[in-house]
Image: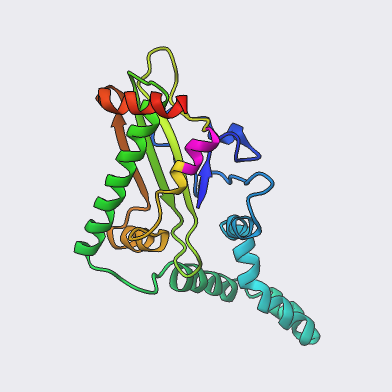
Amino acid sequence: MFVVSPATVWNPAALETRVVPRRFLGRTTLWPRRGAGARLWLRVIAEVEAVRYLAALSPFVVAAFVWRDSAIAIAQAPLAMFLVIWVVEMRLLRRPPRAIDLAEADRTLDLLAHRATAILRDIAAGREMRAGRLHLVVEQSELARIPPLTLVSLQVEGIEGTRPEVLALSPDERQRLRGLFDGGLTERRLHAANHATGQMLRDIAFDAAGVSAHARLAARLARGR
């Protein structure tokens, strides 16, 4: 899971947006800042198409070195190379190993919406927001045969005089977002639900004006501890 915020990426300029929800996968590459962990770095690198294409074509390179007399013929086989890339990308990497039915997918998405709404309410109360719409945007990669890459960001719109943006998050808010996945809701379960419904981006919106007085009071008491 990659919590996306200006403080967590090397290229924060890539977060600029005019619309909400802002999509990232397939449009730009977000590089984690130092300390993100080797697993996240490797997963982000695997999302780069050029890297996957080179890996898929590596047998041709090996064959060219083994059978040097046929190296030119091997290098001039674009149709075979295209076929290998297509098989790896479409048949191997993008086909889910386990399909779930739509009823299970709906239950998973309902659980996601429930947890996301609670997180949005707490963050809006903690920021004492009284206007605007917060969006918890969860975007996952289409690649299905490797661990899912999940981008989670908090985006905001509807505040007078400001443009939509990907919010800068405090350490406590980032930790709150990391609690989105645990117990009955995992990244893999959401990934399977997204593949079942054919939609890899989920946008859960919350109107800041709907924060209750009780939630605002609880947030103030928490800050005073």
Q: Is residue 119 left or right of residue 163?
A: left
Q: Which residue does the image show at 26% across and 60% down from the upper left? A: 105
Q: Is residue 19 visible?
A: no
Residue at the limit of the structure toward the top, as seen here? 161
Determine whether 98 is above or below 51 in the image: below
The image's colouring method is rainbow
Residue at the limit of the structure toward the left, as seen here? 103
Determine whether 151 is above or below 84 in the image: above
From the top left corner, tell me how far across and down residue 123 is, in percent: 40, 32
From the top left corner, tell me how far across and down residue 84 is, in percent: 55, 74
Q: Which residue does the image show at 62% across and 57% down from the upper left? A: 45
From the top left corner, tell me how far across and down residue 54 is, in percent: 65, 66
In this view of the protein, which residue sits in the foreground, 13 or 159?
Answer: 159
In this view of the protein, which residue sits in the foreground, 62 or 16?
Answer: 16
Determine whether 79 is above or below 106 in the image: below
Q: Which residue does the image show at 57% across and 76% down from the upper left? A: 80
Residue 203 figure quarter: top left
Q: Identify the main secondary structure in magenta.
A: helix
From the top left corner, tell me how far across and down residue 76 is, in percent: 68, 74
The number of callouts visible is 0
Q: Is residue 7 visible?
A: yes
Residue 182 figure quarter: bottom left
**86 falls in the magenta region:** no
Determine whether 42 is above or below 213 in the image: below
Q: Which residues are magenta?
A: 170-175
Q: Which residue does the image show at 64% across and 61% down from the upper left? A: 51
